Amino acid sequence: MQPVTVIGAGLAGSEAAWQLAQRGIPVQLHEMKPNKMTPAHHSPDFGELVCSNSLRSDQLENAVGLLKEELRRCGSLIMECADATRVQAGGALAVDRHAFSAAITQKIKNHPLITVVEGEVTRIPGEGNVIVATGPLTSDALSQTIADMFPDSKYLNFFDAAAPLVSFDSVDMDSAWFASRYDRGTPDYINCPMTEQEYDAFWTELVSAQEAPVHGFEDAGVFEGCMPVEVMARRGRQTLCYGPLKPVGLKDPKTGKEPFAVVQLRRDNAQGSIYNMVGFQTHLKWPEQKRVFSMIPALKDAQFVRYGVMHRNTFLDSPRLLDRYYRVRGNERIAFAGQITGVEGYVESTASGFLAAVELARRLQEKPPVDFPRETALGALALYISDETVEQFQPMNINFGLIPQLGYRVKGKRNKNAELSKRALEALAGLELD
């Protein structure tokens, strides 16, 4: 059997390669690292997390928690590696990023049906089955090739941001404390409080701080779920207090009261030596990040082991171009997976790679497709990106708004979401995936 070409060994590409190989289909997995790196990548390993170490909520009352559970039950490589390298983070699934990527890399390279080919791919092969999973940082040459495939369609760019990392031993714990919001789960977040006066001084400097040059950057073009903190701050003095700096559910043990604002730090590695500034994606100049973020009292002497960076995100106008199996309409031998399809988030990218590979494997084995119903998170996401009625397509995280409602009343949002998840998992159990 001719090997399937998978381009890109991020979360989507690694998942796709694994699912194909597990079904007996040989794969050539192309990855340009380490020969060519992007500004957002630091490791030669596969499945590198560049924005945050958190894979978000792991609870079934949350849509991404449901998506993760569906992937687990379907034999996802990414979820297996995430669960094996997880670190405590309250109700979220967070991982030791380096151990996570190393685990994925080892699994992929040791699979007898997967051949890893290092080097940049600049053109999509003219024959054979292909899954393009080059992610939000698709190289210029391949990006142009993809754009040439769809001359009558919009091939879109937007910008994504990564938050700074600080060393734990540089955080002033006399000014901070460990807790999770509302004391849920284990107390794995470091909370850095600010008084109203401290916040006002910080906000004033943040909104006027110098930004790094980013070609084509516009506030309106930034994806809401990963918006630079300085852009968010410009929307109003207290906008951050209702966003990443919200103090709700976080009582300072020294006062017994909620502070005016709270900056949270989340563990970034298993040792707990490095912490991520939650919600502080940014594209400020590095000296400005040091100057402004050090105004947070608990971070006055913080050692920044990585500053925030801004990078380009690229995605297709998928409703016009792709079907529910992530295949190119009218050219089904080519499929796309990952954030390039307009799914937003690490887990969503994994899901697209999984579904694209499962459907390709079934087609090659002359089996009928698996039509994941909209009641499942896997199905809802695929149907969203292929919905031709969507006029102004934008990247989307999985959410319960994409899933049909129950048709009967359930008291309480969490209870309703739990019922939606229960229905989804029951529907998933009835599908034939092999």
Image (tube, rainbow, N blue to C red):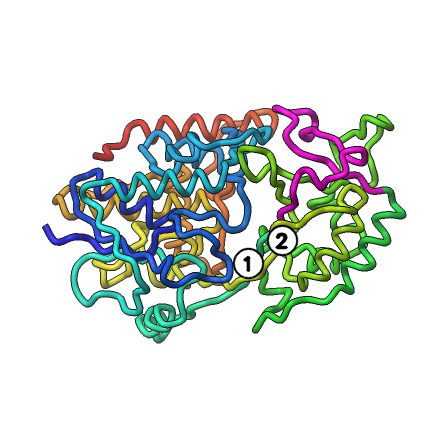
Nearer-the-camera pick, 69 or 39? 39
Which element is circle 1 on?
strand
Q: Residue at x 49, y 55 (%)?
A: 395
Indicate the quadrant where residue 177 lies.
Answer: top right
Q: Position of residue 259 (x, y in %)?
A: 82, 36
Q: Are marks 1 and 2 in contact (CB under 8 Å)?
A: yes
| In-image side of 334 versus 62 (left or right) | left
Is 192 magenta? The answer is yes
> Which three-letter amino acid code belongs to the residue tagged 1?
Asp
Disc sitting over residue 337 in the figure? none
Nearer-the-camera pick, 259 or 237? 259
Question: Across the whole image, how many numbered discs are drawn on residues?
Answer: 2
Q: Residue at x 41, y 28 (%)?
A: 423
Q: Position of residue 163 (x, y in %)?
A: 61, 51
Quadrant where the image shows the C terminus: top left
Is 39 magenta? The answer is no
The answer, for residue 282, to whether it is visible in the render is yes
> Which three-letter amino acid code belongs to the residue tagged 2?
Gln
Location of mark 1 (residue): 160
The answer, for residue 315, to whether it is visible in the render is no
Q: Position of residue 345 (x, y in %)?
A: 48, 48
Span shown in magenta: 165-194
Q: Residues within 10 Å of mark 2 (few under 14, many from 20)?
A: many
Q: Residues within 10 Å of mark 1 (few under 14, many from 20)?
A: many
Nearer-the-camera pick, 401 or 334? 334
Location of mark 2 (residue): 281
| In-image side of 155 versus 209 (left or right) | left
| In-image side of 174 versus 36 (left or right) | right
Measure the alpha-carbon separation of dots 1 and 2.
8 Å
